[in-house]
Amino acid sequence: MLLAPLLYVYTIKKRVKNILGYFIIAFVPFFILHLYIGVDLIFYSRSLFLVLTVYLFGSALHAFIKTNAIESYFPFVLKLNFFLVLLALILYFTPYAEAMWTFKNLTKTIQNFPRLELFTYEPSYYSLLLSPIVIYYVLHLFLIPTSKKQLTSYLLLIFLPLALSLSFGVLGGILVAFLMLVGLKYSELKHNKYFFFTFWGITILLVLFALSSVVIFPNNPITGRIIDLFRGNDTSASGRTTNALWLAHEVAAKKSLWFGGGLGQIKVLGAQVIKDFYNYSVKDSESIAIPNSIGETIAMFGYVGLGLKLFLQLFLYRKTKVSSNYYRLTIFVFVFLYQFTGSFFNNTAEVTLWVIAFTPCCAKFNSSLFARQPEKALV
């Protein structure tokens, strides 16, 4: 966000046209409507400025991906992240553990549980930052022949950080995204023997690992969280989904269910609603938020804004031919689902995922290669 002016200059140099024009078209109509129904201009203007900086970041990222092979940066990021994870594991046994870990209640029954967050503000955000790289390498494992040494290193570098952060929203979203990819592209993938054996081999291993962990360690935190999730005792999951969407509806209703209360108005309109719901005290005022991207959209722009947002996502899906590339398709499905289970409206990590999904990249995963020559495409 602080680099927004430089990013704007970068997009101009890349000959991107109408950068601010699209932003004005999107937000000025809502700005006029919200002024009419009444808003706190200080909160509104501050939030509008923040959204503008995120928009400029997304525009610059789009221009960058169009002219650079982003996958060439992934190995360095993956190795750097793993080095930091090792550092975090060392710090865990020292008084400085909270520099890279968070210790909070995981569920109503699992108290003060450690989760890896590195230098981010929470574990789920850390996992979300990793997701585009994780998806890339998992696709690589499934579609491109890999030696046992590479396979082991990939699994260690990818899944150890995700396991330590224990973000069920990200883990579940990635799993569902891959299952939907297989369902949508089954006619192309069924002829690929390498994919077939790798996919089912890893699936069987994961199932066996899950069953053995339940039998050998029945009280492990993962099993405990899954049980609490089905029982409705997972405070994190409910707070980001059902509770968040209900609160969003209540906040929007204070001004307009059609057009919402406006940018930055959640802390104004929703303060009492959210405090009463969670039994917050005055000192908890910084916790006044709706941790759900769809929920925030409803609260700030109403159901008209939500409809426009979903329409734009589906329009760009078709316009940019997302389904023509396995990587982009998996990213799209993941972030589309994730916005219903967490995140927030001006989340740069979520914007990154949308930009990747809507920008041609990672041509090695173009579905046409596997559809025409499923065996030769792997060379």
Image: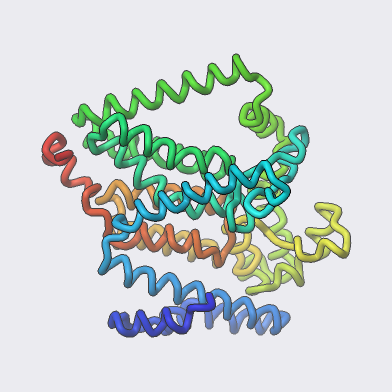
Q: Position of residue 105 (x, y in %)?
A: 74, 42
The structure residue drawn at horizontal position 41% and vertical position 46%, both measured from the top left corner, is 134
> Count the marks: how many?
0
Is residue 52 positioned above or below 245 on the image? below
In the rendered view, would you say 310 is above or below 202? Answer: below
Give how far across and how far down residue 247 sits, in percent: 72, 56
Question: Residue 174 location, x and y as percent?
Answer: 45, 42
Query: What residue sits 36% from the left and 83% below the top?
Result: 18
117, above or below 2, in the image: above
- Using residue 281 as the reference point, say whether residue 302 is left or right of it: left
Q: Give me the residue at 66% from left, 32% from top.
A: 225
Q: Would residue 225 be seen by someone viewing this image from the given angle? A: yes
* In the foreground, 118 or 296: 118
Residue 176 is at least partly visible in this image = no
Q: Position of residue 147 (x, y in %)?
A: 26, 32
Image height of 139 relative to 9, above or below: above
Q: How is the image coloured?
A: rainbow
Q: Quadrant of the C terminus?
A: top left
- Please tell me which residue lies in front, 155 or 246: 155
What residue do we see at 39% from left, 45% from top? 135
Question: Which residue extends farthest right?
Answer: 281
Residue 215 lies in quadrant: top right
When asked about the image quadrant of residue 289, the answer is bottom right
